[in-house]
Image (tube, grey):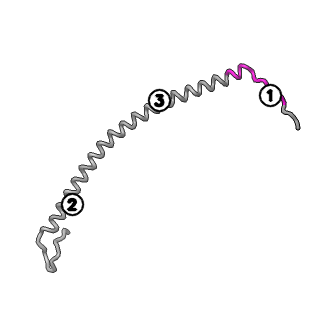
Amino acid sequence: MSSLPEPIKVSPLIRLARWSLLAAGIFYGYTRQSFLAKREKRIRLEEAKRKIIRDAKLKEQRRIASERDIADLSRMFTEPASGSGGQCARRK
């Protein structure tokens, strides 16, 4: 078996540059994550406000539609039958 050659000595300047870039990358990642987290929190708060408003509008629309349906049904079953056979009057 052959033995491995000795590792090449890396210049201290290159090693310093590598460690410096690693530290800079970690710092950048931390600050970027912090910035994005704050922005996402603000976006979620705005969406929550919009959801409350949207839900209130939908609830009102459903209430109106329900009242309209009930009125249509009551009109359908309370109007006198217009024809033979005893069928309920239908809206045309």
The residues bearing labels 2 and 3 have C-alpha atoms spaced at a distance of: 50 Å
Q: Are marks 2 and 1 in contact (CB under 8 Å)?
A: no
Q: Which residue is mark 3?
A: 35
Residue 26 percent across, percent down from the top left:
58, 27
Camera-near label (2 vs 1) is 1
**Residue 83 lies in what quarter of the image?**
bottom left
Q: Identify the residue at horizontal 67%, vertical 25% (top origin).
A: 18
Residue 85 percent across, percent down from the top left:
16, 80
Q: Identify the residue at horizontal 16%, vertical 71% (top origin).
A: 89
Looking at the image, the residue that sits furthest to the top is: 13
Looking at the image, the residue that sits furthest to the front is: 1
Q: Secondary structure at mark 3?
A: helix
The residues bearing labels 2 and 1 have C-alpha atoms spaced at a distance of: 85 Å
Q: Which residue is mark 2?
A: 69
Q: Residues within 10 Å of mark 2 (few under 14, many from 20)?
A: few
Q: Are marks 1 and 3 in contact (CB under 8 Å)?
A: no
What is the number of the mark on residue 7?
A: 1
